[in-house]
Image: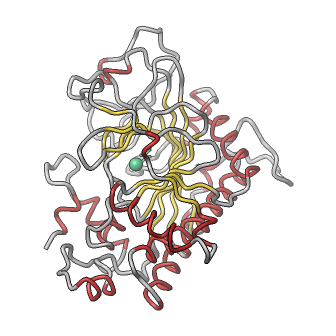
């Protein structure tokens, strides 16, 4: 993929200036979404772990994955300290002067690092965000030169305001890896998977691939004419999203095609299913379309962790699920998530057919 120079705006714009490449006429931002946040499902991980409350909470999880493909995970057990440290470091990174952030810039042909995703041409419309995207697990996949240059010596979990601190990201992504394996185990149980196949599913996420995308959405003078992140369904198994403040921006498309705001909830993590889990569930669960809108006065920062199963898990409809339901598979089976990603990347992004539909039998 060709990378363009100067893709990152220097976000010190005059208040009424939005460069034309960010102005859109193709998106109706107003009058089309409902403030339905109170209706979004909340799932309590503690209740899933407790045998006394498990079956009720599994039922809630099943309906959340079926109806929305997205829920707020509460009581998830990740310590506040690690979360706080990560949020401060991410905010600290985006607060750096442009030339400092550029030290972690994407290299030609790569999506990793600081920049914008999927910019392939000079006339393409841009999304109102900056991101830094880093591979975190397995450890050998890390490109540490992008994490930080000239690393200061960290002896304890301290906050270093000028770098995306290595230790914060390492700890955070490790917490997310453990949590994802746990959440996926319960998603599998909610789907009726058990024994050997449930172990395989859980283990494949425990040993899987984890990539973290940190998103910065500056305040935008014309929020109704720009978009933070275009509608998309994630390609992951699941995605875990942490809000760094209390500014809403994420919206999810409901089954009846309304954009619904997902509010930041203190102590909660947003879990959304990606297309790998939609395929695994043979379409029982949704990988919902979602997008990020921008705010006129306030900037917003979010951290998305994309969780993929290791190559030990074939990516196709669950054999146990097919046997239990007697239904035919609606998707073909690919050998693993690596092949799944390769197919995704070779699929044209502007193709009218969504990627997942190309896997339909
Ligand atoms: C993503 C994503 C939403 C957000 O990074 O894939 O959907 O609110 N982010 O930042
Ligand atoms: Ni997404």
Q: Place residue 277 in its image quadrant.
A: bottom left
Residue 5 rendering spot, x and y as whole percentages: 40, 33
Reply above or below: 229 against 307.
above
> What is the number of callouts on the image?
0
Residue 276 rendering spot, x and y as whole percentages: 35, 67
Residue 39 rendering spot, x and y as whole percentages: 42, 45
Q: Place residue 52 in its image quadrant.
A: bottom right
Reply above or below: 49 against 245.
below
Reply above or below: 16 against 4.
above
Q: Residue at x 27, y 25 (%)?
A: 31
Which colour style is shown? secondary structure
Left/right placement of residue 191 relative to residue 271 reads left
- Observer-nearest residue: 8 or 254? 254
Residue 265 rendering spot, x and y as whole percentages: 58, 42
- Observer-nearest residue: 11 or 63? 63
Reply above or below: 19 against 257.
above
Left/right placement of residue 244 relative to residue 187 reads right
Q: Residue at x 19, y 46 (%)?
A: 350
Left/right placement of residue 183 relative to residue 108 reads right
Residue lying at the far bottom in this picture: please name it: 196
Residue lying at the far right in this picture: please name it: 155
Q: Place residue 88 in its image quadrant.
A: top right
- Observer-nearest residue: 241 or 98? 241
């Amino acid at each position: 993929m060709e990378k363009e120079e100067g893709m990152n705006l220097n976000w010190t714009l005059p208040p009424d200036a939005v460069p034309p490449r960010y102005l859109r006429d193709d998106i109706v931002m107003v009058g089309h979404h409902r403030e339905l946040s109170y209706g979004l499902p909340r799932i309590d991980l503690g209740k899933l772990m407790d045998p006394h409350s498990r079956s009720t909470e599994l039922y809630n999880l099943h309906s959340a994955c079926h109806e929305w493909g997205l829920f707020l995970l509460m009581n998830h057990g990740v310590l506040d300290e690690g979360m706080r440290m990560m949020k401060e470091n991410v905010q600290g990174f985006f607060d750096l002067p442009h030339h400092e952030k550029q030290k972690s810039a994407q290299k030609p042909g790569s999506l990793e690092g600081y920049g914008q995703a999927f910019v392939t041409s000079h006339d393409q419309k841009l999304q109102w965000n900056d991101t830094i995207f880093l591979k975190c697990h397995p450890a050998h996949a890390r490109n540490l030169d992008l994490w930080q240059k000239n690393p200061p010596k960290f002896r304890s979990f301290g906050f270093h305001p000028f770098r995306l601190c290595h230790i914060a990201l390492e700890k955070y992504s490790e917490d997310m890896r453990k949590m994802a394996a746990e959440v996926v185990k319960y998603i599998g149980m909610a789907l009726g998977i058990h024994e050997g196949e449930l172990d395989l599913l859980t283990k494949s996420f425990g040993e899987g691939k984890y990539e973290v995308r940190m998103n910065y959405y500056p305040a935008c003078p014309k929020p109704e004419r720009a978009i933070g992140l275009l509608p998309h369904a994630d390609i992951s198994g699941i995605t875990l999203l942490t809000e760094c403040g209390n500014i809403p921006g994420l919206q999810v498309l409901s089954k009846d095609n309304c954009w619904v705001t997902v509010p930041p909830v203190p102590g909660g993590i947003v879990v959304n299913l990606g297309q790998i889990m939609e395929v695994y569930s043979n379409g029982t669960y949704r990988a919902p379309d979602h997008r990020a809108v921008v705010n006129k006065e306030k900037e917003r920062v979010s951290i998305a962790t994309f969780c993929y199963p290791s190559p030990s898990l074939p990516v196709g409809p669950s054999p146990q699920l097919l046997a239990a339901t007697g239904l035919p598979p609606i998707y073909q089976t690919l050998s693993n998530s690596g092949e799944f990603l390769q197919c995704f990347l070779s699929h044209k992004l502007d193709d009218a057919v969504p990627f997942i539909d190309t896997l339909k039998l």
